[in-house]
Image: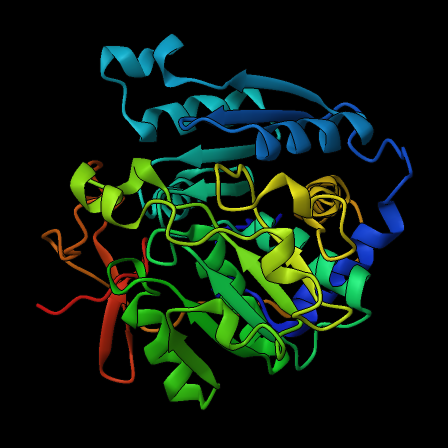
Amino acid sequence: MRDFISMKDFTKEDILEVLKIAKELENKNEELLKNKIVGSLFFEPSTRTRLSFFSAAYRLGAKVLGFDSPDSTSLKKGETLRDTIKMTEAYSDIIVMRHNRDGAARFAADISKVPVLNAGDGANEHPTQTLLDLYTIEKELGSIEGRKIAFVGDLKNGRTVHSLTKALELFNCEFYFIAPDVIQIPEYITRGMKDKGIKYHLISDYKEVLSEIDVLYMTRIQRERFENIDDYQKVAGVYVLDKESIVGKCKDEMIILHPLPRVDEINIDLDDTKHAKYFEQAANGVPAREAVFAISLDLVEVSRSEKTLKNIKESKEVVCENERCITQFEKTNNKYVVDNNHKYCYYCNRDITK
């Protein structure tokens, strides 16, 4: 049994194992999950993630139960996430969960007796999206190693970006973070890169590096993550990709990815160009998530080299300063990690300064 919660839990070898299994399962309808039940808990709206998890489950022979909105559940009556997880584990063999609180997935995994797959927890991480992103890069470019990757858009709140950068660090990649200061990549991520000697650049215009990069990873400015609408209005529409701005100005083999949904940041005139791979990327969510199901339930043979968090401490009081952290809403063990005299939240990965 294995949870898929954070890319911090993976080694390079783990990732390559998942991609290998995904390739083997693509376009096959092997009933590896026959007689298995998937508990699907989506506390936030989702299209691609939810449907691709469903498709993967059905293709492998599983049945799915759950909800796609908390409004129709006992959460409206005040039920805690803890109790929701404890009940769902009794009804299913594995849980897929998307939640609006940072760190909710780690919390759920700690209390669940069945594997938990993180389908996105607040602005924290989205590891299965990362696996399909990596699968797409390998499939389209032939390899992941040493690639130059530009992330554009809302990098502060973009959980897909946070997870993918963690994974790409293992492949000796070079990073370009392109965003206005207010939504630039969090310092706790770049500090980790600096400590490891990984090359990264903070810039404001993707056109400066368009001719150098292998992957342009576009993201949506996430209105729902802004507490102040005025702050959102200041950055809305700041980056727009279209055919004129891309074609002929980038590497011939450069690919454009996007976790979707898009709003207005990619013009539809780019859709029919050889650089646009975001729809293929979304389709790759099925084999990637088939692999995750199979590995989590020990239905395929893989090597076990995953990392484990060390130096985990507990506190009697809430120590995380992130107002969106699950520790602010549920009774947890208030765990934190000490790494090289630096403290960060066990659940949401944010820095702890007190």
Is the residue 333 above or below the residue 101 in the image? below
At a point 48% along the width and 86% down the height, the residue shown is 199
- 91 horizontally vs 305: left or right: left
Scheme of image coloration: rainbow
| Residue 193 sits above or below residue 155 on the image | below
Find residue 141 and report its image quarter. bottom right
Q: Is residue 138 above or below residue 148?
A: above
Q: Confirm whether residue 304 shows in the render.
A: no
Q: Residue furthest bottom?
A: 197
**Which residue is outermost to the front?**
244
Residue 322 coordinates in the image, percent (x, y) = 19, 52
Residue found 67% across the figure and 51% down from its top: 132
Question: How many numbered discs sit on the rendered protein?
Answer: 0
- Please name whichever residue, 251 or 125, is drawn nearer the observer in this view of the structure: 251
Task: In this rendered view, identify the residue nearer to me: 52 or 110.
Answer: 52
Relative side of 47 to 72, left or right: right
Q: Quadrant of residue 69?
A: top left
Residue 283 location in percent, x, y?
A: 74, 40
- In depth, the one of 144 and 243 nearer the eye is 243
Residue 322 appears in the rendering: yes
Residue 127, given in percent of the width and then of the height, sits at 54, 52
Who is closer to the viewer here, 207 or 287? 207
- In the image, residue 63 lies at what x, y percent? 70, 19
